[in-house]
Image (spheres, rainbow, N blue to C red):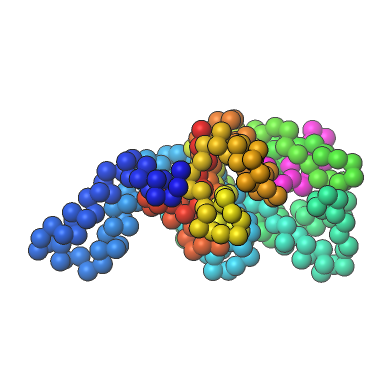
Amino acid sequence: MNESQRAESKRAESPQAQQTTELSTAGPSAGVVDQPDVVEVLLQALPYIQRFSNTIMVIKFGGNAMSSPELFEQFAQDVVLMHSVGIKPVVVHGGGPQIGEWLRKIGKSTEFVDGQRVNDAETLEIVQMVLMGKVNSEIVSALNVHAPVAVGLSGQDAGLIEAAARHPELGFVGDVTSVDPNIVQRLLALELIPVIATVGSDSEGQAYNINADAVASAIAEALGAAKLLFLTDVAGLLTDVNDEASLIAQVSVAEAAALIESGVVTGGMIPKINGCIEAIDNGVSEVHLIDGRRPHVLLQELFTDQGVGTMVTR
């Protein structure tokens, strides 16, 4: 489904949006509104606000949106606005670039195996310090500037994420084996925003550094989230990686699998799409790949008829 078709589909869900033109041309009273574009935006947003109220949305935060101060602030504004209109956001974050920066600062060499950073005991200590002591607290602080609603935690808190070693060569790099969402559910019931750093532990208490995409998917599945949103550094799923105009606005899991099989989806996008498919197969209603380089991308994707990324559906 292309972007115009997706817009038509979304408009079918939101008849209120069709009133916009009528309001802007409805005689003398229409002249009272000096900024009709603002009115149109609000009218487009209304049905989505109503539809998404009281739903859980898991957001994986990373990439350029995390490294740019301006985009970081806009992300915080978007999440708090989502919370303010009745959505229950859960933020999951990694911090690969920040970890790399601190390893360089202390002169710690980094070894990679098949593109994955080896986590020895010293590296793991830096990972925990950076993810939980720096990145997590910065996100929480940015959200709480707008409203005192964010709470930071890691996968080690209250047994949220149980993990196991991925491979001996990678050291303390882990995979999610189970999720106990109780602590997150309790925070959501208190109308708070959980912000989760992606460190988990095994049954013996050994900590592991876990891929943030995998943690976001596992938490969304455990919560039965209505949406899982990945902020990426690309426009979304493209049929031509060199042409952002080839963005696929909406795709079913069957269509997505066929795109992988046919070779249209390649490289690093394959595990992301497979993750989307797995999340939907395990109970998440919709998964979005959106461009974290765009200003206020969450609001554009959720509350406008056109959207701006790729939505993967059943």
**Would residue 119 be visible to someone looking at this image?**
no
Residue 292: quadrant of the picture: bottom right
On whether residue 202 falls in the magenta region, the answer is yes
**Residue drawn at 78 percent across, 65 percent down:** 102
Residue 184: quadrant of the picture: top right
> Looking at the picture, how far across and down is residue 199, in whole percent?
73, 46
On whether residue 13 falls in the magenta region, the answer is no
The boundaries of the magenta stretch are 200-214
**Residue drawn at 80 percent across, 57 percent down:** 126
In the picture as drawn, the residue positioned furthest to the front comes out as 262
Taking 279 as reference, is 35 left or right?
left
Q: Is residue 100 above or below residue 160?
A: below
> Looking at the picture, how far across and down is residue 190, in whole percent?
49, 42
Taking 22 as reference, is 7 left or right?
right
Q: Is residue 260 above or below residue 133?
A: above
**Residue drawn at 80 percent across, 36 percent down:** 164
> Looking at the picture, how far across and down is residue 266, in whole percent?
68, 48
Taking 252 as reference, is 197 left or right?
right
In the picture as drawn, the residue positioned furthest to the top comes out as 282
Q: Name the one closer to the observer, 13 or 266.
A: 266
Q: Name the one closer to the observer, 244 or 154.
A: 244
**Would residue 202 be visible to someone looking at this image?**
yes
> Looking at the picture, how far across and down is residue 49, in whole percent?
36, 46
For the image, the number of numbered tags is 0
**Residue drawn at 76 percent across, 66 percent down:** 101
